[in-house]
Image (cartoon, rainbow, N blue to C red):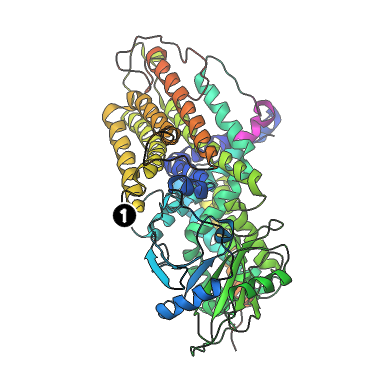
Amino acid sequence: MADASSARNAPAPIRPDWWSKGVAGVILGFALAIAMAGLFAWIGPGGPAAVNKLQFVMWLVVPIWLGVASLCFLFRSGRQAWLWLGGANILAHTALLAARSPLLP
Amino acid sequence: MAIRTDVVRLYRQLHTWTGILTGLILFVCFYAGALTMFKDPLERWITPPAAVTPATLDRAEDLVAATRALRPEVRDFTLAVEPALAGEAPLRLTWTEERFDPAPWAATLAPDGSVAVEQLNPSGIGLLVDFLHRTVGIPGDLDIGTTVTGIASALYVVALVSGVIILLPSLVKDFLILRVTRNVKRMWLDVHNVLGLISLPFHLVIALSAVVFGLHDHIYDTLDRVVYGGQMRAVAAASSPFRTVSKDMGSAVMLPPREFLTRVHSLAPGFQPVSLEYHDAGTGAATVRVWGHDPRYLVRREGFVLMGAVDGRIIDTEYMPGHQNGWSATVSAFFALHFGSFGGGIVRWSYFLLGLAGAALFYTGNLLWIESRRRTERQAKGPVEQSRATRLLAAGTVGVCLGCVAGLSLTIAAGKWLSGMVHDLHAWHWGVYYATFLGACAWAFLRGASRAGVELLWASAAATAAIPATSLLGLVTPGLWVSDGLIGVDLVALAGALTFAAMARSAERRALGGPRDSVWAAAGGHAKSEMGQQPLPLPAE
């Protein structure tokens, strides 16, 4: 798989950190998916109130959430997973708060 | 494709554990889900033939009026159009008292113009298969079961992604290679990989949509609070087809049923109406949903157009194939891809086979885990005890999977025998299923995986063979009958029975002749201590 040259320069082996990565993927991944879907709802085409867009927004959550939850084991350690996903969450939720406005007059 | 070995090792562990945690739940979901593709033929196979002449809609208006007069409190009911025109059911209005009522009420019109109201006693096999598919048979509230399958489906997505990651490095080398050699474990792995890879798109679509179906209430609640500032209900209501319908509950005269069909036809000539669903009938707010399908579009099981029942105006087409906006059409497509409700018979059969292949995938997955956990006697220089976890998982796999298979086959066959003899056939269906399923599980743990595996495979073969046998007996036995035009049900069951019998024979051979340190070896069977003596035609028990 890995050839000799890349093996020489390879970083430290990936740490399993099952629990910390798993919890980060499930919880922070879900929070991130909600924020991304929310951003799509508010600044995506049609605005938040387009007919039946709500259902599409709900469907968006699942692939983002589980994509993050599946791939977050690629982080070098649980700490890395929490830092990166936590940072992404802060950015996405800040953006969502900025994008939101009162829905009903 | 190069992926670091430590990453592959990590994802192999992730794949193993998500698979082991969910394999048995997913087996039941997939096996029952495969059967849902043909739940209507199954229902008809069980139901005694009744002499019904194809009706016209000439008297439908009288039926609605007479039923309204007799039962003014019933304002929501359905007129099945397609079955009445095809002669599969009489012209009747049906309604239920709760959402999943197994025994709906029906009103029919006698020749003299009087209305008879009776409670129907359908077999309910379709409802059973559907509930099993959605809840794996967890009793109690539907929400509990669907939440469990939703969580299992989420783990299943993770298992799919990790399965692809561990397969990528050897993809070119191993793809579509089935090594039938002395190494049985290698062969099972190849079967598992081939099945998984060629049906990957199907599995991803099913897994992601199943998570949505199982967990959408929780996701909506979170969206409401975080994204829509607590006003999601208002957003949803603004999308409801009924948003512009008046609340006028004063009495009003409705148009005849035929008129709705005429108007739908002029709106969309390709739309094939199936039923008319009335809401608030006889009031100023009365509406009719004309349900139907249009094979040219991806729709949820059926689409509908909402019309005013008094004035016949088209109120909403957001669920009407070809008349939806982009959001609605996209979400409808997601539904259609899960249900297989597009493309007609070819897709229906493909989904049936893919569902069975999926069940086989989870079964072989569990077998792989068990085999890889096996401590071989080669290093240990003599017979070894298998670990408790291995023995329990082996017994559980055999009991749950074969209990589900045997239970479904037996309850289908029993339905035909019990039809007309009992008053609540749907309850009997559940009783037969649970008794068989729990009995098989208990049997597997009592007898151990190797003996129970063989015995329950024979039991599954016998239970499945009972379906065509019942039809054969229908030729000679009073009280039984041969269902017209449903030879397919019998043929598929026969093929299934032969498959289970072949698996039983090969499991028998392995128990006696296979490695004696396997969980599948018969106690005291004579030993040949090499792994997997004979190439097996099927993943042997």
Query: Does residue B426 appear to the left or right of B268 in the view shown?
Result: left
Along the line of sight, the residue nearer the viewer: B323 or B221: B323
For residue B430, say whether it is visible: yes
x and y percent of residue B43 in the render? 46, 49
User: What amino acid type should be assigned to the residue bearing mark 1?
Assistant: His
Query: Does residue B388 appear to the left or right of B257 in the view shown?
Result: left
Query: Residue at coordinates 57% horizontally, 49% vertically from top-left?
Result: B206
x and y percent of residue B154 in the render? 50, 51
x and y percent of residue B446 in the render? 26, 30
Mark 1 secondary-structure assignment: loop
Residue B5 occupies quadrant: top right
Query: Residue at coordinates 60% horizontally, 60% vertically from top-left?
Result: B300
Provide the major secondary structure of the magenta segment: helix
Residue B384 occupies quadrant: top left
Query: Which quadrant is the N terminus of chain B positioned in?
Result: top right
Alpha-carbon neighbours of circle 1 within 10 Å: few (<14), some, or many (≥20)? few
Image height of B84 relative to A104, above or below:
above
Along the line of sight, the residue nearer the viewer: B252 or B385: B252
For residue B4, say whether it is visible: no
Image height of B201 relative to B212, above or below:
above
Which range is magenta? B166-177
Image height of A13 relative to A89, above or below:
above
Whether residue B88 is in magenta: the answer is no
Give the residue pinned by disc 1.
B423
Along the line of sight, the residue nearer the viewer: B161 or B362: B362
